[in-house]
Amino acid sequence: MKRLSLFIGMLTTISLVFTVSCVSKEVPVIETYYETEYETETYSETENVIVTTLDGKEYLYPIAKWQTNLYFPPGEASAAQLTFPSVYKLTYYYGYEINTAEHSRIQVEINVSSAALQKEGEIRVIDLTGIGQMPNKPDPPIRKFITETWGKKWLDDLNVVVTNPERILGALQSGIEAENQIIFDATGVTEFAIFANTWNQYTIRSIELIWYDDTIEQKTVIKERKVPVQVEKQRTVLTTKRVPIWEVVFGE
């Protein structure tokens, strides 16, 4: 029993000596980690491809025309309202119908007279699809004093349409440096109108409908795309561990 106690005491003493003799030390270790990188891969896809295109053009002629003493205030934005003038001015109205369903793509090109652009005014193109052509100002009531107030409801209804930004297909402020064309995509448009606020009734020189008929085939095409991949990598990092003090003093 004495020997056992002595042995345990010796082990305890050795353990204490060893513990006291150990210190912390930073040592390098190899660490494995993963990074996301992107590689290019090819793949095939079937899609519609235009193989041939036929195109053509035709002149458009108005189905409705009128004029009245309204104008767009000069110098204001293209969403300005029509209003009755303080002096005599005119707005010419030209309404058109088109059939866009029979063509793949379609656009309208409005050519404006250069002479008409010398005077200040505005030309605005309005989509009337689903609304129909706009009527001229109604005749004044009979046997009543005639003022501009009798046409107010008609004007208010008109301005709801001509100032709606979703229905403005194009606009042109006339002047010395004004462009002489308005071109717009007519896809889905079946009726539209031109409001020409000008002194010249021949402001609109011509209107052309330009169409394209595409022949489409399905083809398999090769494409590229970036895909993420996990890449294994290694790096050296420092970690702390307990080592005998003599290892620190004398080296490993």
Image (cartoon, rainbow, N blue to C red):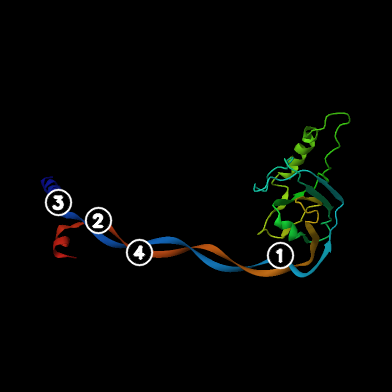
Q: Which residue is mark 4?
A: 235
* Amino acid under disc 4: Arg
Which of marks 4 and 3 precedes in the sequence? 3
Q: Quadrant of the N terminus?
A: top left
Mark 4 / mark 2, whichever is N-terminal:
4
Query: Is 74 on the left or on the right of 34, as rendered?
Result: right
How far is the residue under mark 3 from the one under mark 4?
A: 33 Å
**Callouts 4 and 2 close, C-beta under 8 Å:** no
Looking at the image, tell me whether mark 3 or mark 1 is earlier in sequence order: 3
Q: Nearer the viewer, residue 248 or 67?
A: 67
Amino acid residing under circle 1: Glu
Q: Position of residue 120 (x, y in %)?
A: 69, 52
Q: Of tags 3 and 1, which is closer to the observer?
A: 1
Q: What amino acid type is highlighted by mark number 3?
A: Val
**Quadrant housing the C terminus:** bottom left
Badge 1: residue crowd in 10 Å (few <14, some 14–19, many ≥20): few
Residue matched to label 3: 20
Label whose residue precedes the other's in the sequence (1 or 2): 1
- Element assignment for label 1: strand
> Which one is in front in this view, the residue at disc 3 or the one at disc 4?
4
Circle 2 residue: 241
Q: Quadrant of residue 131?
A: top right
In the picture, the disc for residue 207 is none
State the SS at label 3: helix
Q: Residue at x 44, y 61 (%)?
A: 35
Real-space Cα separation, disc 3 to disc 1, in angstroms: 76 Å
Q: Nearer the viewer, residue 171 or 46?
A: 171
